[in-house]
């Protein structure tokens, strides 16, 4: 599909690809609904006045040609830490160069990058799409229709909430109404698609409460499994599906869904999946989904939003 040319009075999202001293770095500037006429916000990290400095842009000839992958929400380790070294941490003294900027569309999806490509999700008109760009040039390589655009009961916003996960040439994307897609990351072809409410028997949360804003947790790949949390009270709060087929492997827990994303850790000789649900933090055995421990944590709206680190 072809994205229409941006108009001056449309609300837009922008992707900035920026260069650091030793690597290509990505930054997504998500503009608020109040921003109009395609204006980018001016970012001022300091509130107090300081003497003006001479800003020296970094030259592309001094930079590494490619950065390492950033394969899921909050990076490869899902904790916001990059494996890159020697990054430019003082953008006041050494301003990163803008390589490209493109209008994208609405939503909350972050960015993932691997093999010289960048993927994200966005809403356009009445549908949500998975979109792929060339990371160096910003050229759109493909866009794949994923699902109708989701709007919550309170009509606060539309579009995807979670971030795609890249793994071994495939892209795993969870949409707000529970549609889980596995795509060929190079071509954008849909390899399989399931709805996590339908395969798990978990109730659709928008039918249970007005205080629900769509599936937001980004998929976690653990071995041959994709870990998700539809939320339910019949051992289906958290589920695992086969990464190659989408078939349900196990379910666990009896909590409503949270908005933070699951992570995996190794501690005390035990590999654990840590899931922030709507009312607790769960630790599960990855292979069988058996409960290791549970800590009650939440509020009356079941709105746990933070991802464990």
Image (spheres, grey):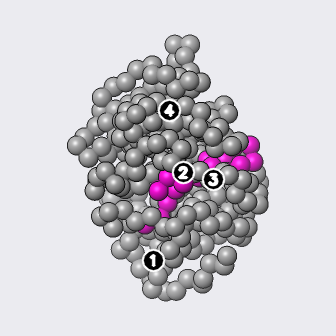
Give 120 or 49, whichever is nearer the viewer: 120
Local crowd at mark 3 within 10 Å, few (<14), some, or many (≥20)? Answer: some
The residue identified by callout 3 is: 193
Please indicate, yes or no, whether residue 166 appears anywhere in the rendered image.
yes
- Residue furthest to the left: 300
Kindly identify which residue carries mark 2.
195
Please give the residue where the numbered disc 1 appears in the rendered image: 11
Identify the mark nearer the N-term, 3 or 1. 1
Magenta range is: 158-179
Of residues 169 and 88, which is closer to you in this image? 169
Relative placement, left or right, of 197 versus 190 is left
In what quadrant of the picture does the N terminus appear?
bottom right
- Of the numbered discs 1 and 2, the one sitting upstream in the chain is 1
- How far across and down, in percent of the image, does residue 46 sit? 37, 57
Any mark on residue 251, and which? 4
Q: Is residue 57 visible to the viewer in this orientation of the structure?
A: no
Secondary structure under the numbered disc 1 in the rendered image: loop
């Amino acid at each position: 599909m072809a994205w229409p040319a941006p108009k001056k009075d449309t609300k837009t999202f922008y992707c900035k690809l920026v260069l650091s001293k030793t690597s290509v770095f990505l930054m997504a500037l998500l503009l608020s609904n109040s921003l109009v006429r395609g204006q980018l916000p001016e970012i001022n990290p300091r509130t107090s006045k300081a003497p003006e400095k001479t800003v020296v842009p970094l030259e592309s000839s001094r930079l590494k040609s490619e950065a390492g992958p950033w394969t899921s929400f909050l990076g490869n380790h899902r904790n916001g830490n990059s494996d890159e070294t020697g990054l430019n941490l003082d953008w006041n003294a050494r301003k990163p160069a803008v390589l490209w900027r493109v209008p994208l569309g609405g939503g909350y999806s972050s960015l993932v990058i691997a093999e010289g490509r960048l993927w994200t999700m966005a809403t356009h008109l009445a549908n949500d799409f998975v979109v792929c760009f060339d990371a160096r040039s910003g050229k759109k390589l493909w866009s794949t229709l994923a699902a109708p655009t989701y709007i919550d009961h309170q009509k606060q916003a539309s579009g995807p909430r979670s971030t795609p996960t890249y793994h071994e040439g495939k892209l795993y994307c969870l949409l707000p109404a529970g549609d889980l897609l596995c795509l060929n990351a190079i071509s954008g072809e849909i390899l399989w698609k399931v709805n996590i409410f339908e395969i798990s028997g978990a109730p659709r949360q928008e039918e249970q409460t007005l205080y629900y804003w769509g599936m937001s947790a980004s998929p976690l790949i653990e071995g041959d499994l994709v870990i998700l949390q539809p939320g339910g009270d019949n051992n289906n709060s958290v589920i695992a599906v086969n990464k190659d087929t989408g078939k349900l492997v196990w379910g666990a827990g009896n909590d409503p869904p949270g908005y933070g994303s699951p992570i995996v850790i190794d501690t005390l000789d035990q590999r654990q999946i840590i899931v922030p649900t709507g009312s607790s933090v769960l630790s599960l055995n990855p292979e069988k989904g058996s409960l290791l421990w549970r800590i009650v944590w939440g509020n009356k709206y079941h709105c746990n939003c933070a991802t464990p680190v």
